[in-house]
Amino acid sequence: MNIQLLCVGKNSENYLTEGEGVFLKRLLHYCKFEKKTIPDLKNKKNLPISEIKKKEGLLILKNISPSDFIVLLDEKGDVLSSMEFSVFIEKKIINSTRKVVFIIGGAYGFSENVYQRANKKIRLSSMTFSHQMIRLFFLEQLYRAFSIIKKEKYHNA
């Protein structure tokens, strides 16, 4: 199974980028994984939020294909425990899902078009974190899910 993490905007914090690198490297033992970043919009300080979401949404939709299974990492999504998330990933493997794309939007979330295209929404926490921090948290949880599936010692439950 191919897994892609699609993010809006670059990560400007070195400590987060380093942490991402640790989990990106670990994930390659379990699946074909790609992280793709959509550049920030230019002059977005001059745009209303609705226009930012619309433009980012068009860029997101341009970077996915019709056959992709799309999961939005979104505050309106389902809350899953680490065990439940590992079951979700395992089902995608068993069902021979070709490609799952997890998407982290920009600071203002997703456009309506992106919500309509999504197959699933997952909320990583009830707390609010920057979209840059969510990248690291998600990669750790994805690694944890694979370690649970493989019955490795990383997850202590």
Image (tube, helix red, strand yellow):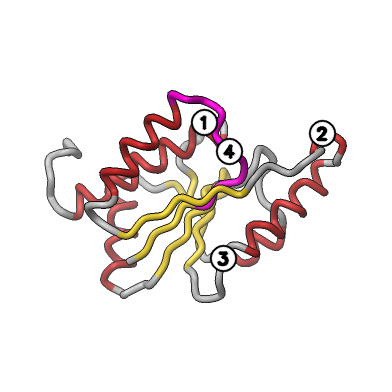
Q: Of helix, strand and loop, which one carries label 2?
A: helix
- Spot occupied by residue 26 in the image (x, y as percentages of width and height): 26, 44
Residue 44 is a magenta residue: no
Q: Nearer the viewer, mark 1 or mark 4?
A: 4
Q: CA distance from mark 2 to mark 4?
A: 16 Å
What amino acid does circle 1 point to? Met
Task: Please report whichever mark, 3 or 2, sits nearer to the chain's N-terminal start.
Answer: 2
Give the mark nearest the N terminus, 2 or 1. Answer: 2
Q: Which residue is mark 4?
A: 10
Task: Tell me how far mark 2 sits from mark 1, CA to CA.
Answer: 26 Å
From this view, report whether residue 147 is shown above or below residue 17.
below
Q: Which residues are magenta?
A: 6-15
Marks 1 and 3, how far apart in space? 28 Å
Which label's residue is closer to the chain start, 3 or 4?
Answer: 4
- Image coordinates for residue 63, horizontal then vertical, percent: 59, 62
Image quadrant in which you'd find residue 91 = bottom left
User: In this figure, which residue is indicated by the disc labeled 3?
Assistant: 64
Q: Residue at x 64, y 45 (%)?
A: 39
Magenta stretch: residue 9 in it? Answer: yes
Mark 3: which amino acid? Ile
| Cα–Cα span, label 3 and label 4 | 18 Å
Q: Is residue 66 left or right of residue 107?
A: left
Query: Which mark is nearer the camera, 2 or 1?
Result: 2
What is the CA distance from the residue labelled 1 to the residue labelled 4? 22 Å
Residue at image mark 2: 45
Mark carried by residue 127? 1
Query: Residue 132 at x, y = what percent?
Result: 53, 34
- Tell which tag, 3 or 4, sits nearer the viewer: 4
Q: Could you tell me which secondary element the residue under label 3 belongs to? A: loop
